[in-house]
Image (cartoon, rainbow, N blue to C red):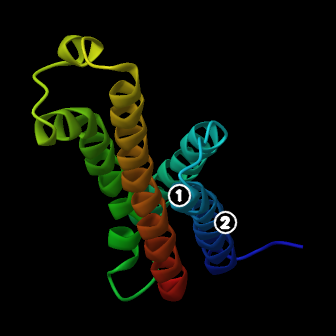
Amino acid sequence: MVLGVGAVTLALALLTAAVNAVVGLYGALRWYRVEQAPRFWPALRGAQAVAVLFALYGTVLVILGEEPEGGLFLLYAALPVAINVVAEQLRIASAETVLDARGIESAAALGERPEAEQRSVVTQILRRELGVMVSAALVVAFLALRAAGTA
């Protein structure tokens, strides 16, 4: 059985959406419960890899002239990569944002604070990082569903 380009495109778009949605929902649950999420990070990297592969697939389709009609497919296929890049930058800025909000000049200055405050700050930073990346995964899932709709 040979699948057409449309069927393969639809399957890859749905796979990208499903993987990112599952990872995003898992992370959202951990964020809501204020729980550590060590399994989230490797799963997120896998979901990001799936999104990158889907974007590359979309690019190849455009190069070969096989892009689905409507003109929005490549946008929906490639935009998740940009979303993930921006989210990573926001994640990196999370620590500085939390420290600034609490009037703490640096990580070294945090080390001089009481242990309970240190834990509170670290928890807030990790929660902010998790929230940013959960949001990105859910946006990527939505965009992949939009790509599936154009397939």
**Residue type at mark 2?**
Leu
Residue 49 left/right relative to 7 = left
Residue named by callout 1: 54
* Left or right of 143 on screen, residue 17: right
Q: Quadrant of the C terminus?
A: bottom right
- How many callouts does the rendering have? 2
Disc 2 vs disc 1: Cβ atoms closer than 8 Å?
Answer: yes
Q: Is residue 63 visible?
A: no
Front position in the image: 48 or 22: 22
Question: In which quarter of the view is residue 45 placed?
Answer: top right
Residue to which mark 2 is pinned:
15
Q: Position of residue 91 (x, y in %)?
A: 31, 41
Tag 1 secondary structure: helix
Q: Is residue 83 in view?
A: yes
In the displayed structure, 149 sits above or below 34; it is below
Please name the residue shown 16% across and 38% down the image. 102
What residue is shown at x 51% (from left), y 69% (from top)? Answer: 141
- Residue 110 position, x and y percent, is 24, 19
Against 65, residue 127 (above or below) is above
Q: Quadrant of the N terminus?
A: bottom right
Choose between 13 and 151: the one closer to the eye: 13
* Quadrant housing residue 49: top right
**Looking at the image, which residue is at 25% across and 45% down?**
90
- Amino acid type, callout 1: Phe
Front disc: 2 or 1:
2
> Where's residue 72, x and y in %?
34, 80
Element marked by disc 2 = helix
Badge 2 or badge 1: first in the primary sequence: 2
Name the residue nearer the viewer: 1 or 94. 94
Within 10 Å of disc 1 (Cα), the crowding (few <14, some 14-19, many 20+) is many
